[in-house]
Image (tube, grey):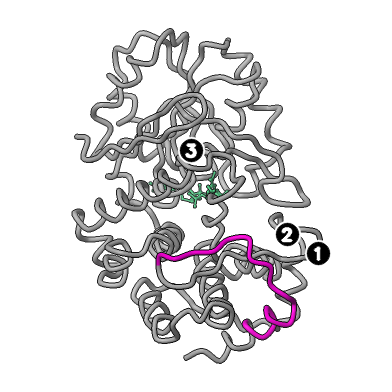
Amino acid sequence: MIVGEKKVNHSLGSYSIYLSEDFKGLKERIENIPSVSNIIIFTERPIAQLYLKYLELELAGIKPSIHIVYLKGGEKNKHIDRVKKAYHQLIDIGADRKSLILAMGGGVVGDFSGFIASTYQRGIRFVQIPTTLLAAVDSSVGGKVAVNLNKGKNMVGTFHQPEMVFMPLFTLSTLPKKEWRCGIAEIAKHSLLAGGHMWEDFRNHSYSDMKYDSDILKKMILDSIEFKASIVNQDEKEGGVRQILNLGHTTAHAIESLTKYSKYSHGEAVAIGIITALILSVEIYKFPKELLKEIVTAMVKYDLPSKDSNKASEIFEHMKHDKKKDGNVLKFVLLQNIGDYKYGVPVEKKDIIQAIKTQVNLI
Ligand code: NAD
Ligand code: GLY
């Protein structure tokens, strides 16, 4: 049963994001997509083992033939080296310009499948079926698709908007805790940027409220999607305000790279990065110190960290590869207050180092 719908506008039209208890309602919506020649489900085996039967049950009797392509999971397989094999699989299936890809999985499946859809025969249609919290509130919204190179994450990508996003909420029941925290960090980011009731909800709830109270979960997911959709509606290709969605990510990418992607999940790194940005915000924009304390306390309720013990100078060194820097100048998203953001703020090396040092000594 569908429990919520949000619209995303883009330069070529719009699409809907459906939040659903289960897969019911997906078939009729796919049938509304005109002239589909065949359907190709892209997913990972562990996700297929859990959910493919439900998806196939929902699609039973649909006219276009259904094919399945299994992708290898994990960030290291969202890689340019895997792309050729996927194109060949599509050719073997007989995929043409009217084929429809269904990407069922987390952000890795969504980004990889979306990249394939955006480039195969100069672009075919695709539907996102996110099964992680992060994919629901972030990666499936807004049309960014990409694969990795050895020399960097998401280095090759395009903007390719899906026909729709359909989130079957029941799939979150099997999501491991560390994956929940990845989604929660992005919800924290959206809440701080949006302010108002979204921040109040985040501050007043906790990890277990989200996991065990489905009304709270649905509301927080829908609000988060609505916020991200409102930003990408204004700036599809990140020429301006969409940059705010990078809050916390400069430090996050640096500590992930410094710790060789093994110490922190992306969500944990984002949580730490948000706190670095807020300490800079205290210095540069007089962001209220008491709010910073409140935010650190809220992160604890979601079991998210707020600091890293690596040397500030080493973290800074790893920031130099940031895709968002302008020449040699690192640019940050900062807050004047909760819900009151600034983006593209140039910050000097000494201020960044000082902020990271301050962070280590934080409660
Ligand atoms: P992921 O896709 O790797 O999924 C995490 C793990 O959870 C995987 O092992 C997966 O098999 C498993 N899984 C997925 N659904 C499950 C379920 N319902 N039950 C049990 N296990 C399940 O990770 P993610 O956090 O969803 O996505 C991360 C990716 O998203 C990164 O590559 C990142 O670059 C990308 N991303 C893209 C955007 C964008 O705008 N395109 C935004 C944010 C992140
Ligand atoms: N995750 C950042 C963006 O979609 O722009």
Would the CB of label 1 be found within 8 Å of ligand 2?
no
The foreground one among 180 and 157 is 157
Mark 1 or 3, nearer chain start: 3
Residue 356 found in image quarter = bottom right
Residue at figure coordinates x 36%, y 76% from the top left: 298
Q: What residue is shown with label 3?
A: 45
Residue at figure coordinates x 64%, y 35% from the top left: 158
Residue at figure coordinates x 49%, y 70% from the top left: 335
* Number of marks present in the image shown: 3
Distance of label 1 from label 2 (alpha carbons): 7 Å
What range is drawn magenta here? 339-355
The numbered dot on residue 325 is 2
Image side of residue 93 versus residue 30, left or right: right
Residue at figure coordinates x 26%, y 69% from the top left: 205
x then y, percent, for residue 73: 56, 44
Q: Based on the picture, tell me whether residue 7 belongs to the magenta stretch.
A: no
Distance of label 2 from label 3 (alpha carbons): 38 Å
Image side of residue 85 versus residue 277, left or right: right
| Tag 1 near tag 2, CB within 8 Å | yes
Which structural element holds mark 2? loop
Disc 3: CA contacts within 10 A as few (<14), some (14-19) or many (>=20): some
Question: Which marked residue is nearer to the observer: mark 1 or mark 3?
Answer: 1
Residue 35 found in image quarter = top left
